[in-house]
Image (cartoon, grey):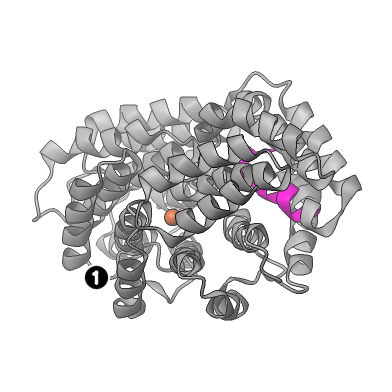
Amino acid sequence: MLDVRGVPVSYDNAEALERYEAALKKLHQFSYDPTPDLEDIMAEYPDFAMAPIFYAAAIAGGSAGRYDPDMQSLISQAEKIGGLNDREQGLIAAIQRRVAHDWRGAQLAVDSVLAEYPHDTLALHLGHQFDFLLGDALNLRGRVERALPYWDEHIPNYANVLGMHAFGLEECNMFEHAEAVGKEACERDADDGWAHHAVGHVIEMVGRHEDGIRWYGTRKEHWATGDGLSIHNWWHFCIYLMEAENYPRILEVYDDYITPDESADPESLADSTSLLWRLMLHDVDVGGRWEANATRWRQLVAEGEGGFYGFNDLHAAMSFAAMGWVDDLSDLEDKALKQAQQSHTLGQIAREVSVPVVQAIRAWHAENYESCLDILSAVRPLLVRFGGSNAQRDVVDQTMLVAAIRGRLGKRAVLLANERIVRKPAGPLALRLSERAHAA
Ligand SMILES: [Fe+2]
């Protein structure tokens, strides 16, 4: 049968498909984790192959490595059901590349599905996440644009497609276009947390922090609940507050919404780390908040995340450095070096980016700020390859600037501050960093 967008599904049960659609909406909106719903659907309709495929795709869109066996098992479950159509087989091929750590191959496999089925929003979402994980801004925008001519507002999930487009435009620095598309997506689907977030990114990148506080404040009911993107959106809210030097409010938000628990995933933990690290760069006392963060990183590293994916390694290294856990830093570097020996996409990322950034943070911890700055300066053009957004990777730019200040490398500090001032002339943070650079 066909789903509501005309995409073929190898299972003929309208009720099962309706429940699948509701779970898909949660995925697109980044509101709630759809996997509990999928577990129920799989239990009730054991021959519905798209349910385990969707489940595996939902995991595959994250950065974790420790769920590879789960994804493999879900794929096997779908294959055992049999009778899969070419679209379902294509999605499985993409997830298999993801499990084999050939993430570039996974991107290309999704391209093949979308070439035949541009209305397959699960494939679009999965490809968008792969593009994000690989820092592939051109595909964050282009993948959606390759499908858009086949879309119109009457096709279900159109708003969510616009939300993805807005984020891709934003990461390509096409800010005006991104804001217009993102706001249209929010009008069409107010609860699309990804579209809301795309507009938030635009506002951050152009330095309109007061506008950002308003955008988040007036739309709170649409992004602050759920277990999808809410923590990350609180993080964005704090980044605006940082421009305003409202540190007490940031710490309050951190304690209420961002502080990690014992089950925190790498994505939300990286947000927590990034915020604490930025506060440290601006000499804000964060008290004992690092401990829970570093303890969770230690667990995740032991469970297989250490050395797996560079963006997470950077944040784990920052956390261990903040705690002075030298052995953990050294262990993390060893794991990244081991990953760097592999020929797949993650091995390439480890070679080019993860190993240098972990070494840079080790140099920071040893108060060898010049070495830290030298390493980060060399790797900076390649940083994009370990994914994350421009706003998230700004933590490295800020680290470089403060390394130059702390290392009393006055001229280099001023030059880095110049970049920031020119890019965000209205940003108080850029001005403060510039003053510190000149003083150094
Ligand atoms: Fe973001």
| Residue 76 in picture, x, y percent from top left | 55, 40
**Front position in the image: 432 or 222:** 432
| Residue 318 in picture, x, y percent from top left | 72, 50
Q: Is residue 146 magenta?
A: no
Q: Name the residue type under label 1.
A: Ala
In the rendered image, which quarter is residue 244 located in?
bottom left
**Front position in the image: 398 or 231:** 398
**What's the magenta region?**
307-320
**Front position in the image: 212 or 171:** 212
Q: Circle 1: is it few (<14), some (14-19), or many (20+) Cα within 10 Å?
A: some
Q: Secondary structure at mark 1?
A: loop
Q: Residue furthest front?
A: 439
Q: Identify the residue under disc 1.
A: 190
Decide whether the magenta segment is chiefly helix, strand or loop.
Answer: helix
Q: Please tell me whether residue 151 is drawn above or below residue 275 in the rendered image.
A: above
* Residue 382 horizontal side relative to residue 361, left or right: left
| Residue 124 in picture, x, y percent from top left | 32, 42
Q: Please tell me whether residue 110 is drawn above or below residue 152 in the rendered image.
A: above
Q: Is residue 285 visible?
A: yes
The residue at the point 71 percent across, 24 percent down is: 340
* Residue 108 horizontal side relative to residue 165, left or right: right
The residue at the point 39 percent across, 59 percent down is: 27
The residue at the point 35 percent across, 42 percent down is: 171
Ligand 1, seen in the image, is in the quarter at bottom left
Q: Please tell me whether residue 405 is drawn above or below residue 201 in the rendered image.
A: above
**Front position in the image: 45 or 264:** 264
Q: Is residue 81 visible?
A: no
| Residue 164 in picture, x, y percent from top left | 29, 49
Number of residue marks: 1
In the rendered image, which quarter is residue 16 located in?
bottom left
